[in-house]
Amino acid sequence: MRALEPIESGQLTTRGFRIGYDVFGKRSQPSLLLLPTWQISPSRHWDMQVPYLARSFRVITYDPPGIGTAQRTDDAAAFQLDRVVDYGADLLDHLGVGNAGVVGLSMGGAYGVWMAARYPERVSKLFVIGTVLPEWAFADDPSFWARRDSYDGWEKRNAHYWREHYEDWLTFFMAQVFSAPHSTKAIDDAIAWANETTPEILINSVVNPRLLPAMPLDDAIERIRCPVLLMHARDDQIADIATSRALAEARPDWELIEFDAGGHAVHIRNAARVNVELGRFFGLPQPSRRMVRRALAKSPPRILMVSSPVGLGHVHRDLAIARELRRLAPELEIDWLAQDPVTRVLRAAGETIHPLSCELHSESGLCERLAGEHELHVFSAYRELQETFLANFMIFLEAVRDRPYDAWVGDEAWELDYYLHENP
């Protein structure tokens, strides 16, 4: 269940292979290119970022050969780092984009470094998360090809094991990627996406020095001229944080943000904070302390009410609460951040609806799709709605950034309950 569908999807044949791509947001907005990572995951891993970024940017994602909507091939040439970088530059040409902000995760961080070095005129800013160096994937490793009697822990990173026990490899690997507690939904999604490719494709995408970039790392670091932000979680089980620290030491002008926790895919497990940092780095207005600490003033007290759109019982209860609050404090101002069909009831009652309400992503529409004709499994729905909850929480942050309130009131506002708990 995607919170936001692309405005354009397609495939592009370039450099001898076919990639798939999606475009979100308005074509008139500045462009952001979200890079792919290793072939074990499609560009869908950016789903927690896309709705937020697409409100202000033309967001472009692409799948390299081997995964997602791209060509399936086990030709190792398709996975060369330089070629994957070239796919991105060619896609920008295809879409008529001169330059873009670039974002990468894991291997995508390496793609971003070499893209900014080789195509400095195409990259306006670079934001990389949990970066691994190309040797992590491509360096020669005889143990990868050795058959064993048993495979424990990282010994499962082995060609024979992948061919014979692919599901077990995925279960192990994704548990390392999502090492933070309560990551079952993320692990389930990642395993499902990884089943879009094959063990043979993954085998041909690693442990091959011919896939390493032509330009040495030191030269790439020196050639980059755009602003760079490095982000890394200290509990990352895949990429050693020492890599990001070494990059920051080599280039003191680059910004480094370290998270205490979040694992390798911190953009999923700590998505709200990562989104705020993405917005800050790429120039979007930011939340401030006035969100939670109004200056003492003589203005009337204000409340922002967030009422669940899943069933209309909530809004009738909330209207009764609002009427009682106004009886107790006649000067009280109430704004409603709500979506259809709640807004229809609110308009009929003469209430003030926050203008950002029209930007909210439909929860009731997704629940109807999940329920079919009969019943809704609420726990499953909650899991499927995570992208939508985050997208709407980011809109909530925008609403309370632009106008301070004395209180936020949520009636079954699951997105506020979760993301404010995670980001107190």
Image (cartoon, rainbow, N blue to C red):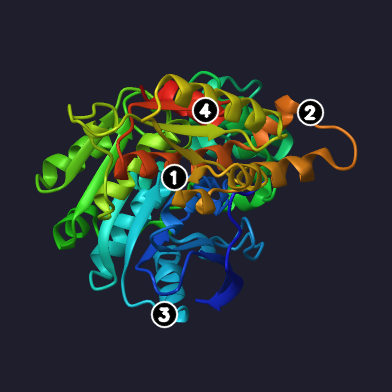
User: Identity of the amino acid at label 3?
Assistant: Asp
| Residue for badge 3 | 93
| Residue for badge 4 | 322
Residue at the limit of the structure toward the right, as seen here: 374
Helix, strand or loop at mark 3: helix
Specify the quadrant of the image occupied by residue 312. top right
Q: Residues within 10 Å of mark 3 (few under 14, many from 20)?
A: few
**Front-most of residues 3 and 143:** 3
From the viewer's perspective, is the residue at label 4 or at label 1 nearer? 4
Q: Which mark is residue 377?
A: 2
From the viewer's perspective, is the residue at label 1 or at label 2 nearer? 1
The CA span between labels 1 and 2 is 26 Å
Q: Residue at x 65, y 48 (%)?
A: 344
Helix, strand or loop at mark 1: helix
Q: Would you say 285 lies left or right of 394 here?
A: left
Q: Residue at x 47, y 80 (%)?
A: 94
Query: Does 249 appear above or below 66?
Result: above
From the viewer's perspective, is the residue at label 1 or at label 3 nearer? 1
Q: Would you say 385 lies left or right of 93 here?
A: right
Q: Residues within 10 Å of mark 2 (few under 14, many from 20)?
A: few
User: Identity of the amino acid at label 1?
Assistant: Ile
